Image (cartoon, rainbow, N blue to C red):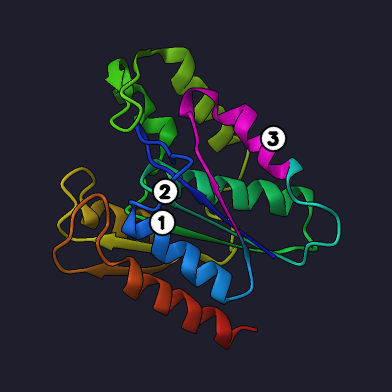
Amino acid sequence: MKFFYFNGFNSAILEDWSGSPKIMAIADYARAAGFEFLPVSINFRDAARHSREILGMIPAGDERVVFCGSSMGGWFARIMQLLLFGARPEIRVEAVAFNPAFDMVAHAHMLRGPQQNYVTLEEYEWTDSHSKVLQQLEMSVDYDAPLPFFVYVDKGDEVIAWEHSAERHSGIAIFLAYEGGCHSFDHFHEALLNFDAATRRTT
């Protein structure tokens, strides 16, 4: 069993991620639950290549995979769930998203312009071609497909209005909103407990 974790837009997962309480908590949960924990740093300008590489990391015989991510990484976790199900429907696959981005077809163009990764400090230009990569990935799957999707948000998210996320994910996900918090997502312990309880009930 594998448990993937993906970073958000303009973020990255360092080789030493011990300074991140969120990643540490997810890693501890995944390992205690019997998963191989795989934090994968995503450069969203190259999301299509990353998606193919990640699918290649799942060998024949794997019975269960969880894709998890924060912000754009949450959106990517859902996309990866749907891609894996389309290629390998025999695998039990779940997606867990913290304060996820959504609807790249409608919103990816808003990223256009100068950007800086706040972890690596890389400066770059986001172009319409980069947006098209995300939009094509989203259009290649049925985002609303009835697969186990867990969306957890902080009402204090200063980037994505939680009400908009609730409206988008209503009916396609188990959705929980926590008081306070921020876009980085503060309630990861509570979310992991909810995910664990919900998935145990279906095991």
C-alpha distance separating marks 1 and 2: 7 Å
Quick one: label 1 or label 2, which is nearer the N terminus?
A: 2
* Foreground tag (2 vs 3): 2
**Residue 62 location in percent, x, y?**
78, 62
Kindly identify the residue that appears in the image at 19 percent across and 52 percent down: 157
Kindly identify the residue that appears in the image at 50 percent across and 35 percent down: 42
In which quadrant will I find the N terminus?
Answer: bottom right
The residue indicated by pointer 2 is 17
The mark total stands at: 3
Local crowd size for mark 1, using a 10 Å CA cut-off: few (<14), some (14–19), many (≥20): some
- Please name the predominant secondary structure of the magenta segment in the image: helix
**Residue 178 location in percent, x, y?**
22, 69
Q: Residue farthest to the bottom?
A: 201
To which quarter of the image does residue 181 belong?
Answer: bottom left
Q: Which residues are magenta?
A: 37-55
Amino acid bearing label 3: Arg
The residue indicated by pointer 1 is 23
The residue indicated by pointer 3 is 52
